[in-house]
């Protein structure tokens, strides 16, 4: 594992952490990353589903997607995962903040071309994105595998950044009779909606 | 309003929409965007709080942040907002998908240097990020304003993309006795946590 010096955050070094375990915890808690790359001098930032497989970040898309095609061609990229954990209400707008956990992974994503490796990585993606689901699904066909692009971005050069805890107010604001604290935010799961064409008698699986 | 031709998504044009009203709805429903830009051939994607002010996206950060400084120097960027609305369980992994609403805004962010304009844009940011809060907060000091960088990115060149609704399975999979549907996801607000130094007698405001 190597870390590029210039991925260091200068502003608040205490919020930056290069620890691999922390990065994995943040990555494993998410399903969507934002992948950035520049094409003809124009940066693009694209939301993509992902999964971690050991020291690689797997991202996938349609083989027909222009952006995925470009990403697979060896462009340098940055994949960022952010969990927005809370709004931090300080007694001034200046000290108000947000709680979050974030990882930026820098590098070049390798397209997975071997059919067996592609099948394996798609299984890892399905297991991460929809835990428990895979046992219910038929095997991917060759045609489907060919139409899917899976990319592996090494988790070698990365930077984690977090903010947690209560607001940090200026001393001179502490006597203000204004409430301060944190409003937690969380991505929550709602009640499943059946597709209109679910066969009669088929019930919702436990893994939902 | 202009839209750059190459921001068009080739893959699923029915999921792309250049309509300004739709883009505003998606922008107004979020608080965090991912801003991408390239510096010395390395793309960066940074989560930042934002608010929309008419046809501009306001983003802000510390004047001391290296990334904000670089962004303010006139680099082309892309700010992407994504709402992750649900997991779409199809009867094959190939047709499984995600429901989401996303906007990419392309351009160059202008640093706001005029003190009055900066004060006004910070108010817009506070009103969007923490509705109702502003009345409880003292005015920002000159020192605080000077330490804050606010950038305005014109919402001129942008692209919205959404997926909604149930899975679209292949006809040959419709007779499979496997549940299909959508598991909705939503960023939900938890119970506020008081800061340890809240003055006795100060209660939680209604706007939380």
Image (spheres, coloured by chain):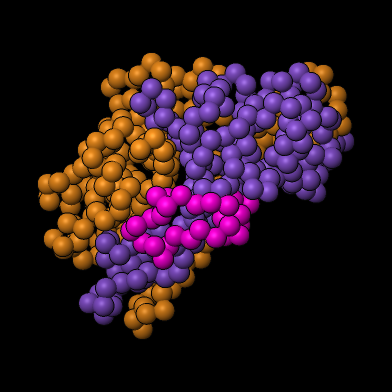
Chain colours: A purple, B orange
Identified at 20% across, 61% down, the residue is B144
Does A141 appear in magenta? no
**Residue bounds of the magenta highlight:** A1-29
Name the spot of residue B179 as percent of width and height, x first: 80, 36
A34 lies left or right of B142 = right
Q: Residue at x 29, y 41 (%)?
A: B71
Can residue B85 be seen at all in this image of the molecule?
A: no
Query: Does the image show residue A118?
Result: yes
- Identify which residue is drawn at 56% across, 48% down: A156
In the image, taking residue A94 as reference, residue B81 lies left or right, namely right
**Location of residue A25 in the rendering, given as x and y in whole percent from the top left corner:** 61, 57
The relative height of residue B92 versus residue B187 in the rendered view (above or below) is: above
The relative height of residue A147 versus residue B118 in the rendered view (above or below) is above
Residue B208 or residue B70, whichever sits in front: B70
Q: Is residue B15 above or below residue B97?
A: above
Of residue B203 and residue A127, the one placed in the foreground of this image is A127
Q: Is residue B143 left or right of residue B172?
A: left
The magenta stretch spans residue A7: yes
Q: Position of residue A90 (x, y in %)?
A: 33, 67
Looking at the rendered structure, the number of numbered marks drawn on it comes to 0
Q: Is residue B126 above or below residue A125?
A: below
Q: Position of residue B5 (x, y in %)?
A: 38, 16
As drawn, which residue projects farthest toward the bottom? Answer: B200
Q: Quadrant of residue A63?
A: top right
Q: Nearer the viewer, residue A74 or B75?
A: A74
The picture quadrant where one finds residue B58 is: top left
Q: Residue at x 76, y 18 (%)?
A: A143
């Amino acid at each position: 594992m190597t870390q590029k010096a210039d991925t260091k955050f200068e502003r608040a070094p205490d919020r930056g952490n290069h620890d691999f375990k922390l990065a994995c915890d943040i990555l494993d808690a998410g399903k969507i990353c934002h992948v950035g790359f520049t094409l003809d001098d124009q940066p693009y930032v694209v939301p993509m589903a992902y999964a971690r497989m050991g020291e690689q970040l797997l991202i996938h898309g349609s083989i027909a997607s222009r952006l995925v095609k470009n990403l697979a061609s060896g462009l340098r990229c940055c994949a960022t995962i952010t969990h927005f954990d809370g709004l931090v209400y300080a007694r001034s707008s200046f000290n108000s903040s947000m709680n979050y956990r974030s990882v930026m992974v820098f590098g070049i994503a390798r397209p997975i071309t071997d059919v067996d490796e592609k099948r394996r990585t798609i299984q890892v993606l399905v297991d991460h994105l929809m835990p428990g689901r895979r046992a219910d699904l038929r095997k991917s066909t060759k045609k489907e595998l060919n139409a899917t692009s899976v990319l592996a971005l090494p988790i070698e050069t990365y930077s984690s950044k977090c903010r947690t805890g209560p607001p940090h107010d200026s001393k001179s604001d502490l006597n203000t009779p204004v409430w301060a604290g944190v409003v937690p935010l969380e991505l929550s799961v709602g009640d499943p909606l059946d597709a209109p064409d679910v066969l009669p008698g088929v019930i919702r699986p436990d893994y939902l």
